[in-house]
Amino acid sequence: MKKLILIAFFALLYLGVQAQDSGFGLGVVFGEPTGLSAKLWTSERTALDATVAWSFYGSGWLHMHADFLIHNFDLIDVSQGSLPLYFGVGGYVGLGSDMWLGARIPFGIAYHFEDAPVEIFAELVPGLALLPQIDFYMGGGIGVRYYF
């Protein structure tokens, strides 16, 4: 089961790498969890993001998640670049002494530079672990991505 989940997750990342000229970004996120972050824009307002990271929750574990995000570019007006608020829904898998499986609801803000293919972001992510036991989870972090 763990191998199947890992294969599916890396296949999703591979598909994103193949679409680099369609808005694919790769970077890092620091917080809970901390690791590599990828984002693939699917339209002007929607995107898929995925992370492979280390979670410091409990005794620590490998954390992988994927989210569907909706961005609102109209709420905050800036003179240069763009500053969308976003929200979404997704899931996560944690691999450690146990395998964790749960749902996430990310909320965040991102700044897209006008003259550089760079995005900085901050997000809070409440979640609910479903396996091996039901438990509340709170994640979040700050990060940066470079778009190819």
Image: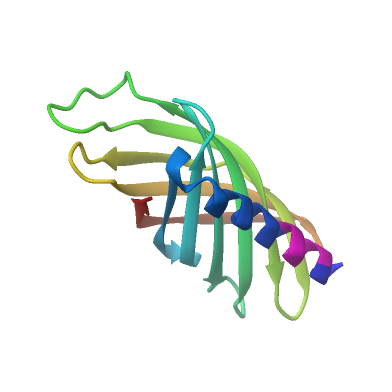
Name which residue lies at 35% across and 39% down.
109
Name which residue lies at 62% across and 50% down.
15
Can the viewer see residue 23?
A: no
Magenta extent: 4-8
Q: Position of residue 85 (x, y in %)?
A: 38, 32
From this view, report whether residue 2 is shown above or below residue 126. below
Query: Please, what is the dominant secondary structure of the magenta stretch?
Result: helix
The answer to which image quadrant residue 73 occupies is: top left
Q: Position of residue 119 (x, y in %)?
A: 31, 47
Q: What colour scheme governs how the chains and residues are painted in the rendered image of this protein?
A: rainbow
Task: In the displayed orientation, state which residue is furthest to the right.
Answer: 1
Name which residue lies at 22% across and 45% down.
116
Can the viewer see residue 124?
A: yes
Q: Is residue 123 magenta?
A: no
Q: Position of residue 8 (x, y in %)?
A: 75, 58
Task: In the displayed orientation, state which residue is furthest to the top.
Answer: 74
Name which residue lies at 59% across and 78% down.
60
From this view, report whether residue 138 is shown above or below residue 46. below
From this view, report whether residue 17 is shown above or below residue 22. below
**Is 136 left or right of 22, judged from the image as shown?**
right
**Is 79 left or right of 119, judged from the image as shown?**
left
Q: Position of residue 37 (x, y in %)?
A: 47, 58
Name the one closer to the observer, 25 or 144.
25
The number of numbered discs placed on residues in the rendered structure image is: 0
Name the one closer to the observer, 9 or 29.
9
Q: Quadrant of the N terminus?
A: bottom right
The answer to which image quadrant residue 42 occupies is: top right
**Is 51 left or right of 133, judged from the image as shown?**
left
